[in-house]
Image (cartoon, grey):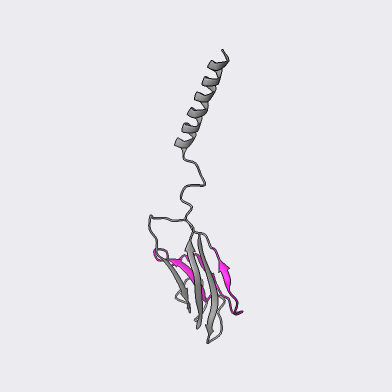
Amino acid sequence: MVSVDVHLHVNSSGSNGKSFGIFLIIQPNSPILLTEFLDGIWHSLSPSFVATSTTHTIIFASELDARTPGVPSTTDVSYWIDNASLDLRAGGAVPEPGMYWLVGSGLSALLLLLRRRRR
């Protein structure tokens, strides 16, 4: 998950509804996020993405135009960003099959030990 705080810097020529984006450099045609904030307050964003490689370059972009997929027209809206971070959740959520075998073996050994002590 990418986290970043975004605040309007300059709105020179109106909006197009999608003047700020977060992209992976290897997937420029599939933005992680396209949005727009014109109210002059800080907004905290936390879009998620699935890593497809061991390394990625993340791009924060504003003043997007029609060359960006999903952006309808040119805009001259820029932003300040702050507190950018990346939350890595590498494999911790889903146990690997080997982990089940290890836990099962440990429980079996514990049950066998308890059974021997009862005799």
Q: Is residue 101 above or below residue 66?
A: above
Q: Residue at x 54, y 63 (%)?
A: 46
Q: How many marks?
A: 0
57 or 30, nearer to the observer: 57
Task: List x then y, in percent, for residue 5.
Answer: 54, 70
Q: Which residues are magenta?
A: 18-46
**What is the x, y in percent for residue 100?**
49, 34
Q: Main secondary structure of the magenta part?
A: loop
Location of residue 19 in the rendering, given as x and y in whole percent from the top left corner: 52, 76
List the single residue furthest toward the bottom: 12
113 magenta-colored: no
Residue 104 vertical position relative to residue 1 in the rendered view, above or below: above
Instruction: Say which quarter of the image contains residue 36.
Output: bottom right
Q: Is residue 30 magenta?
A: yes
Q: Which residue: 50% across, 68% down?
A: 83
Hey, which residue is sitting farthest top in the picture? 119
Who's the residue at 48% across and 52% down the image?
89
Question: Depth check: 23 or 28 in front?
Answer: 23
Q: Which quarter shows the C terminus?
A: top right
Q: Position of residue 85 (x, y in %)?
A: 48, 64
Q: Residue furthest front?
A: 117
